[in-house]
Amino acid sequence: MSSPNFVQANTKGRLHSAAEPVISPLDRGFLYGDAVYEVWRTYEGVVFTFAEHWTRLEASAAALYLTLPFDAEGAWRELVWTVAAFRAVVPDVGDLYIRLQISRGGGAIGLDPALADEPTWVFLVQALPAVAEEKMRAGLRVVMAEKIRRNHPSTLNPAWKTGNYLNNVLALREAKAKGADEVLLLNLAGEITEASTMIVAFVRGGEVITPPLEAGILPGITRRVLIEQIAPRAGVPMRVERVLPEDLASMDEAFFLSTTKDVTPIASIDGRAFRLGDDTVTLRLKAAFADYAREQTLAHPERAVPQK
Ligand code: PDD
């Protein structure tokens, strides 16, 4: 009964296995990617940075003129209920991946947002997909997308976390077809932006450098935690600055940042290798991040979700 791949869904208050179809084929999330989403994770049974993700969800929804179906506490109650249902089926896994997807809803076929009935929302809960230890040690092999650029902020703004990831999907496809683990996207000005679902950062001469929001990236919450909390505590200077592909030659280390993967080392970009191993700034930051996450777990008992 208990399967490690089980995904619990809560669609508009109805609990079911995510393997079961529930949403109308007229749903605008399916037809047009007319949706927003967020992803949280737990550390030791406590949801990390719940409020920060909620605030970003509100910003994404506002950008799409989409009215959210509940407030933060309403969402929290549904989240807890969904986790409890997941735990009843899969009691024996550790940290969780929690996703909230909200589309503008269904209605008559047509682009006009006024045709939408009411938002469709789904919470999804599954075991946190972990990066294999071996991969974490060896680092990710990355290539720069050649065919696809990151959307310009005046098109589908990368700052909005929408249900339309086709640009990133195609970029990742391109990288995978070349045998790489992950992709980096340039913007139209040729500057490095981010990966398919992760922020990128570099280390040069002991200093961390990460592209600015203006490059056209998601305002990553892990990125913000690193800038505001982790780097200062670890005594690592950090700078937000545009990065060009030719700058890679002078970088010592590179890593990714995201909710699900926290700090993940990069082995190479387009064959240019970076330093790896215990004696790196990257792993120092990863350890400092783990300490911070543990601290937050103790500081936010109100964000604890049902355990086994
Ligand atoms: N991805 N950039 C993009 C395009 C992303 O989709 C994400 C998050 C990030 C990292 O942001 P944060 O630190 O706030 O998670 C950067 C989530 C985890 C996902 O889609 O699974």
Image: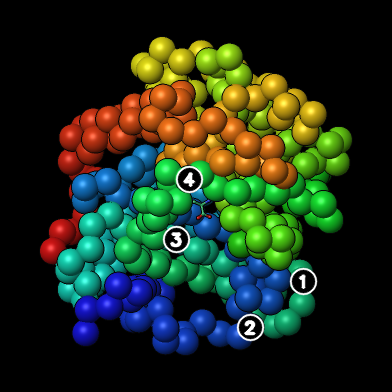
Q: Nearer the viewer, residue 197 or 110?
A: 197
Marks 1/3: CA–CA distance: 23 Å
- Residues under labels 2 and 4: Cα distance? 44 Å
Residue density around tag 2, few if under 14, some if 14–19, many if 20 or more, within 10 Å: some
Badge 1 element: loop
**Residue 35 location (% of width, % of height):** 60, 63
Q: Judge the density around disc 3: few (<14), some (14-19), many (≥20) Cα neighbours within 10 Å.
A: many
Indicate the secondary structure of the residue bearing disc 2: loop
Locate residue 94 relative to residue 71 in the image: left or right.
left
Q: In this view, does 262 lie above or below 90?
A: above
Q: In this view, does 22 lie to the left or right of 299?
A: right
Q: Residue furthest left?
A: 308
**Amino acid type of disc 3?**
Leu
Report the residue marked by disc 3.
100
- Specify whether 193 is left or right of 17: right
**Disc marking residue 111:** 1
Q: Is residue 53 visible?
A: no
According to the picture, the residue beneath numbered tag 4 turns out to be 138
Question: Could you tell which of marks 1 and 2 lies nearer the N-terminus?
Answer: 2
Q: How far apart are marks 1 and 2 (CA)?
A: 12 Å
Q: Could you say which disc has been placed on residue 228 in the image?
A: none
